[in-house]
Amino acid sequence: MSQVLQNSSPTGTRATKVIGVCAILVMAWVVVSGLILTPQDVVQGESVRIMYVHVPSAWIAYLAFIFTAVASAGWLLSKKHSMGFDRFAGASAEVGVMFMAITLITGSLWGRLTWGEFWQWDPRLTTTAFLFVTYVGYLAVRRLEGSVEQRARRSAVVAMLAVL
């Protein structure tokens, strides 16, 4: 651990490394507490532990998609079309897609244990899956041919439509 703190990095100070190590230790404790030490639910049994991953993943994904839309709107509305908005939107979308995939997978696993099937055509489940596919499409649009500004404009429009 002392070697981690002593390595110099252009992106961090000793304080940020200490905070990072502390954050990792706290996260490890939270995982152990939530997934191992807590008792099982009276109704759902052990499957309730899936919710400890599923619900926060969904919140993070939705928040990341909101950030994507806000940054895309910022890019569209800014006079100079700052590429910082575009980069932030793209990074937020990648985070959102990853956490939405976790949400859909853990939700399906929980559904199998609770309902006896992996998927039900509930409107909330279906719209979440549609949102996931839409943002995967957003990431594909970001990879299309064209100038940086063309790609930023197209992806910003897709992000604004997806958030509706």
Image (tube, rainbow, N blue to C red):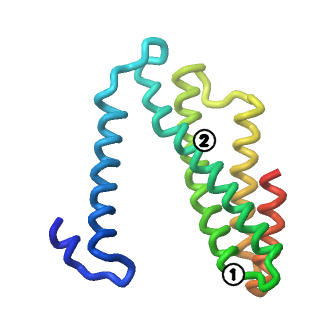
As displayed, is residue 91 above or below residue 25?
Answer: below
Q: Is residue 96 left or right of residue 38?
A: right
Q: Work out whether 125 lies above or below 143.
A: above
The amino acid beneath tag 1 is: Met
Q: Amino acid at mark 2?
A: Leu
Give the vertical position of 133 relative to 7 (above or below).
above
- Look at the numbered disc 1 and give the secondary structure of its residue: helix
Q: Residues within 10 Å of mark 1 (few under 14, many from 20)?
A: few
Of residues 9 and 131, the one nearer the viewer is 9
* Numbered mark located on residue 83 in the image: 1
Q: Which mark is residue 140?
A: none
Q: Quadrant of the N terminus?
A: bottom left
The numbered mark, 1 or 2, whose residue comes first in the sequence reads: 1
Q: Residue furthest top?
A: 42
Q: Residue at x 22, y 71 (%)?
A: 4
The residue lying toward the viewer, choosing from 118 and 33, is 33
Query: What residue does disc 2 label?
Result: 104
Q: Position of residue 7 (x, y in %)?
A: 23, 79
